[in-house]
Image: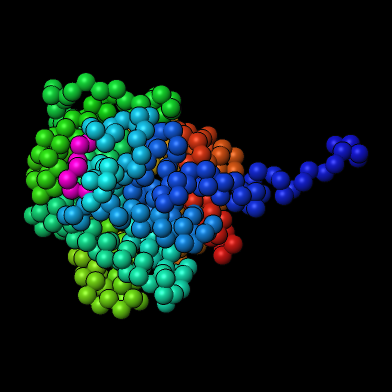
Amino acid sequence: MSTNEPLPNMTDQPDNPAALRRRAKQVLKDNDRGRYTVPNPTIYPFQWNWDSCFTALGLHAIDPARGWRELVTLTEHQWVDGMIPHIVFHRDDDRYFPGPAIWATGHQSPKASLGVLTSGITQPPVLGLVLETLSNRSDLDDPTLRPIARRLVAAADRWHRWFVDHRDPDRQGLVAIIHPWEAGRDNAADWDDALQVVGTDQLLPYRRCDTEHAEAVERPTDADYDRFISLLQTFRSRDWRQSELHDASPFRMVDPGFNACLIASDLALGRVAARLGDADVAARATRRARSKTAALDRLWHPGLGQFVCWDRIVDRRSDNASVAGLLPLLALSAADPRSAMLATRIERWMDVAPFGLASQDPTSKVFDPVRYWRGPSWLVVNWLIVKSLLDQGRHDLAERLIESSLALVATSGFREYFDPTTGDGLGGDGFSWTAAMTLEFLGLTRQC
Ligand code: GLC
């Protein structure tokens, strides 16, 4: 460098924390539709359940009231039976398939008469976790905020009760998902065997849109999509009567990650309810969490040293090692010997695939570093893992995952997901939850 050349301005470097924070906030502002946020304007132009919850954390950092509003909007579309749906179709947009006309849910959703329809399935329950995180950053005695927090507590409690009634009707202890989209991990290898039995002969003709906005090799296959749509048709033929869907579904999977989110959300809900003086909800939520934690034992795979899925249709434990099986770290105590085993798995996976945490065991045969939930790293999952590691006192490992997650966005942008072997950005760009998690990780770095 010649002595006359100006030195680079470090505050303008894209990976400078202040610059990263600014860019993350801009993504959230771009995707903000006033009362809700879209995950991404082209691939996902509506409100998604768990995206909104994670995104609320980022919005709260910009404007606390807007963060709370995101959660309130989501719960305004809670079904009369208690389910909080996975998509709220606030406005027409034909860039996404399947849209509201395909779901045809109608009657159950409280704002259907106003023209706002929803999908007919749900998503991982992280509302309770986010509610507690926001509550910890707020003054719950504030007379404007207190009723909002109480309302969200009631909504989460109703949703969690719905899970027990409609996704564990035989009271086996854990809840099942009835569609891969419910897990939020659409094409995870966890479903490969189970999806084989989902018939596609009655499939109506359809055209997917996602591959028009993202590379086909980074998305679920057409064969996966046929099954996704076939399941939707099955449920629609029952007019979305949730009380029938569990038993009618040819896909019933007990996912350890999903159940871990529910347990952690119930524990969090119990603590917030106690702070708000709602002893009934506090006791109920804590009771639910305890019984589910005990039931997790059945999903432990001693050979792998992690949790795995249980296929409720054939009543069999899976042998596949996905990141869902590491998430019960959210629910276990640090003293539980399985916690240390899970932490060791996380370390090993990061030794092999060091850019974030892979969504599938990177040493497994089915690992695919670019195809959606079959290998890539997702910042929201990294955040859940970081949270559990911090709760367990594993600051070293948490810091390693925070740093590698931040390096991903600094280098590759606010992408939907990332190749854990190279750090390349994949899927859509300008993703709300990636931006929100960046703000979270930057906040955590300050605390470390
Ligand atoms: C995909 C993801 C799901 C997410 C949605 C919107 O379907 O698999 O987890 O909620 O996109 O971002």
Q: Residue at x 27, y 42 (%)?
A: 115
In the shown orientation, is residue 8 left or right of residue 20? right
Q: Residue at x 35, y 58 (%)?
A: 72
Vertical order, 223 against 43 (above or below): above
Residue stretch in magenta: 103-109
Q: Position of residue 265 (x, y in %)?
A: 31, 61
In the image shown, does 403 or 199 lie closer to the viewer? 199
- Say whether residue 164 is visible: yes
Is residue 86 part of the magenta span, yes or no?
A: no
Can you say which quadrant of the picture contains the C terminus? Answer: bottom right
Can you name the residue that lies furthest to the right here?
A: 4
Q: Where is residue 419 in the image (x, y as percent from the top left)?
A: 47, 36
Vertical order, 154 against 176 (above or below): below
In the shown orientation, is residue 441 left or right of residue 214? right
Q: Where is residue 144 in the image (x, y as percent from the top left)?
A: 42, 71
In the image shown, does 263 or 74 lie closer to the viewer? 74
In the image shown, does 437 or 328 lie closer to the viewer? 437
Q: Which residue is drawn at 52% across and 43% down?
A: 30
Q: Position of residue 37 (x, y in %)?
A: 43, 47
Q: Residue at x 41, y 24 (%)?
A: 212
Asked where in the image residue 168 lies, by quadrant, the reply is: bottom left
In the image shown, does 266 or 400 lie closer to the viewer? 266
